[in-house]
Amino acid sequence: MADDPTDDDLRSREWFARQDSYGFIYRSWLKNQGHAARMFDGRPVIGICNTWSDLTPCNGHLRGLAEHVKRGVYEAGGFPLEFPVMSLGEPLMRPTTMLFRNLAAMDVEASIRANPMDGVILLVGCDKTTPACLMGAASVGLPTLVVSGGPMLSGRWKGRTLGSGTDVIRFKEAVRAGTMSLEEFMAAEAANSRSAGACMTMGTASTMAALCEGLGIALPDNGAIPAVDSRRQALSFEAGRRIVAMVGETLTIDRVITRDSLKNAIVLNAALGGSTNAVVHLLALAGRLGIPHTLDDWDAWGRDVPCLVNLMPSGEYLMEDFYYAGGVPAVLNQLRDRLAGHQITVTGRAIAEVNAAAEIHDARVIRTLAEPFKPLGGIAVLRGNLAPDGAVLKPSAASPHLLVHRGRAVVFADSDDLKARIDDPDLPVTPDSVLVLKNCGPKGYPGMAEIGNLPIPPKILKQGVTDMVRISDARMSGTAYGTVVLHVAPEAAAGGPLALVEDGDWIELDVPNRRLHLDVPDAELARRRAAAAPFVSKYARGWEKLYVEHVMQADKGVDLDFLVGSSGPYVDKVSH
Ligand code: FES
């Protein structure tokens, strides 16, 4: 394929170059939208995959951004066609958006492959919309470029700054501890979310948007420009221009996302104190692209990378501050000696070159490697008889004094049991206890709930204790914090040892040595296993049934087993 933006080798020519009744149908029906005949002259067709939805408020402004993408596509000589896909709105969907990430990815994959497009822009924002679109696009393999919606403006209330999610968790615990009134709690709502955009802490949405820069699949500054800053519109315009060129360069997603770019993203995630959810999303994405990638890569690549940014939930500033301080390019430039700097990005240039001139403008928000914000970035991958296939913990969000801890288990059988008993004044719990939650993993919940940061019992909060060791097969919100062991694999519902923990068992957490141990004799564990009832899903039909039967464990990225890999972009049959 030549660099000429009009090219008969383009995939879309299989639709639009035809002189028969098929070509008539393909062109004629599209012309009812007012497209001129020259739109079908061999110019690249760019799909704009839009996760806009009123029900995904974090993505509510993406219809507007799509118009800026289209302008860029037209200016570069392409033909933009916007299409909707399933959107996943974290605030509203039940039981959890993660149950539907793979379903949305199937929608994205099928929508791209079935339609006449040569390249695709993924317009994403809220947490799962980014990995879902990337996974779907990866299983097709066209030139692909991500445009994120960007974060909301900082929350402001009573003269103080509010961070999405993080302050909700603080407020909730303050109400439970009796130090905040319900009236104040309700009054803070509007102040918390005061513009379009995604959560403005370094939660999962901002983590994934930033990691798209680390992966090289988005333009510089995609991660942090505020949603309502006009520079977000300009970035969308430039993305539209660039994807047309990428088609000409055959710069497909598999050339951009490689094992080296995964390494770059994981190093970046460590420096950002990014969300633990990124672990399952990148593992799943790697699976779609056939890239060898395991949980151990997270520990190996991120272990010695300090946290450089002072952002909630690990720190105090917000995404708006982060952008003004230099954003993701400034962090990537700090990390230049630790990155696979040669890796090509959607710009067509190497990641080291792209970020070489980026500077830190505010050292309170972005620190240097020489003077990091926290010495421990990264994701600690724990193993032991309680998590044979691994579990994760985010050291930058944990309490240093709890990173080595031995305590007795207080066990909750599932999320319903947790809700029923956590506030019970008679709960037999002390500050040294280890809270254990079962049956909230991929199969058990199903969908791997974001409730791994179990609430601290009120009787403990009233003692002034704000953190305890917590262990589960669940995930936690990227906006959450605490000494929280997550993603225990195998999960309880898949027969993991977590299912065997009983009240009063001793549990040992040793983060420096990456160890998670249930101090119960093997013979006793064998007795418990023999007596345990097998997990039975309550779902007899529909997506939930398919999901529970095919979902893989957290250490494999929670994708469905039959979705791993790619089927390429070609379709060998037509229907008319
Ligand atoms: Fe949508 Fe946080 S809830 S980005």
Image: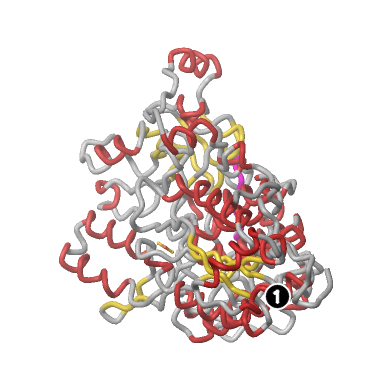
The type of residue carrying mark 1 is Asp
Out of 173 and 139, give the one closest to the viewer: 139
Out of 464 and 119, give the one closest to the viewer: 119
> Which residue shows up at 41% across the image and 18% down it?
533
Answer with the quadrant where ligand 1 appears in the image. bottom left
> Which residue shows up at 55% across the image and 48% down it?
106
Residue 305 picture quarter: bottom right
Percent position of residue 520, x then y: 50, 23
**Rendered view: 416 above or below 483:** above
**Rendered view: 330 above or below 374:** below
Percent position of residue 44, x then y: 69, 72
SS at badge 1: loop
Magenta includes 292?
A: no
Colour scheme of the picture: secondary structure
> Which residue shows up at 72% across the image and 73% down it?
42
> Which residue shows up at 71% across the image and 52% down it?
570
Percent position of residue 463, x then y: 28, 52
Q: Which residues are magenta?
A: 377-382
Magenta includes 380?
A: yes
Residue 551 picture quarter: top right
Can residue 84 be seen here? The reply is: yes
The reply, left or right, for residue 89 in relation to residue 77 is left
Q: How many marks?
A: 1
Residue 556 picture quarter: top right
Location of mark 1 (residue): 41
